[in-house]
Image (tube, grey):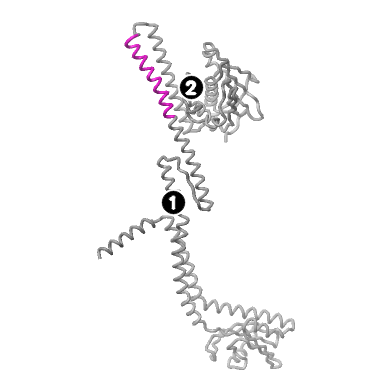
Amino acid sequence: MSYLKTKFLNLKQILSKKIKKNSLVTNIWLFLIVFSVLILAFLWIFQTLFLDSYYKSYKTKELNNAAKELIRDYNNNNLNSMDTIARDNDICIEIFDEENDEYEATYFNQGCIEFGNKNFALKKDFINSGLEQKSYNLINNRFDNITLMYALKLDTNTYAFINASLVPIDSTVNILRSQLVYVTLVVLILSFIVGYFISKKISKPIMKINNDAKRMAEGDYNVKFSTNEDIYEINELVDTLNYASTELSKTDELKRDLMANVSHDLKTPLTMIKAYAEMVRDLTYKDEEKRNNNLNTIINETDRLNLLVNDILDLSALQSNNTLECEEFDLIQIIKQIISRFNILIEKENYCFIFDPPKEEIIVYADKKRIYQVIYNLINNAINYTGDDKKVFIEVKELAKAYRVSIKDTGKGIPKDEIKFIWDKYYHNEKKHKRNEYGTGLGLSIVKNILQNHHFKYGVDSSNKGTTFYFEIKKRVSKLI
């Protein structure tokens, strides 16, 4: 007894694992079974409960149609078609001419009520009623069944009586019920079997995709989603998940690069600050010149740390809040102000900024503070990567509805297969971070976010003779979309 109980519990556990509540397999399976049950219920109701009333309604309709045909043919003086009408509709037709006391009858239906039987009084009653037409439900005692009769007046003295016996269908209903019992059992069994295999076929690729998605959620971005099913929606889901996996892999790689690069940029100045501070404390605190040089180094490294932190905060703010404070301002004045910030490079390191504006004043509409930041970062980027001639070209070109601002360096350029990555945070050629004096590695990412928030067109052109970054800014006041 305990052995059977153990086997039963094991079977129950296996089934519970394979058929989980609310799973796709269970839902599809139950749906197909319920659908089959509803179809069978429909058949039971209409083939047994309503068959008798449907049969009666059908015969009544036949009588009405026959009456219409008879009236039409009588009006066309064509009573020869009476046999055809009776035969096609399986009914009985009698024509009575009261003036000449003549009868004409056609019998095709078993159990027809003849004009000369005891129902003659009912027919005489209709003739005397003056009605144009009337229907009757009669009991035919001869055959013990119901007979439908339709009486109508063809003209002043001529009347037609159409009748049809309703054959008892109790035996037919019993046969249908017996047959439906077997049909129900077969359909339910097939529903269980077919429903199970269909649900497994549909759910199998989805379960596989789900398992692969769990691996991706755990950080395995090398997983490749695939399916052998020729189902459009599932194939579309596979393509979407493969794309998401690729993008997440890029994001994860960029995140690691960002952490490594930020750590590098934070560690180096902090190390130098500590080293020079200790040097001032222990060695050069009495030598004014060396002490001041050491303190200036500490100040410069602190400024660099401050610049890096500010860029990180700016990028975070841009990505979380795209609210703009737009206004009209002079684009030329902004560019000149930015160039003046790099005068120290012109004086000490012989940098050359070439800017020849087409007009003395160009009024544009945008967020002044953010556009200032865009131009500053692009010029700063050109400074970091320009060639040995140390030249940076700034150009403003007038277009139909905007002005194109271009900043060009004379460096070695960017490989074509890497151009699409340059807007990423902390991206550097060959993925090797090179710390420089003026940049943090976040400038282009800040530029991209600002221009996207403005819905401004931007881009980059590069060759082995230099790289040009550009963006287009609106001429006049207009609502940003």
Q: Quadrant of the N terminus?
A: bottom left
Which residue position holds label 2? 439
Cβ atoms at labels 2 and 1 below 8 Å apart: no
Q: Residue at x 53, y 53 (%)?
A: 230
Name which of mark 2 and mark 1 comes first in the sequence: 1
Q: At numbered mark 2, what does the secondary structure look like: helix, strand or loop?
A: loop
List x then y, in percent, for residue 431.
Answer: 48, 28
Q: Nearer the viewer, residue 96 or 414?
A: 414
List x then y, in percent, for residue 99.
Answer: 71, 92
Q: Nearer the viewer, mark 2 or mark 1?
A: 1
Magenta residues (range): 258-283
Q: Nearer the viewer, residue 189 or 69?
A: 189
Q: Is residue 330 visible?
A: no
Q: At numbered mark 1, what does the secondary structure look like: helix, strand or loop?
A: helix
List x then y, in percent, for residue 140.
Answer: 55, 89
Q: Is residue 273 magenta?
A: yes
Q: Amino acid at mark 1?
A: Met
**Would you place residue 248 above or below residue 116 in this image?**
above
**Would you place residue 420 above or below residue 386 in this image?**
below
Q: Which label number is shown at residue 207? A: 1
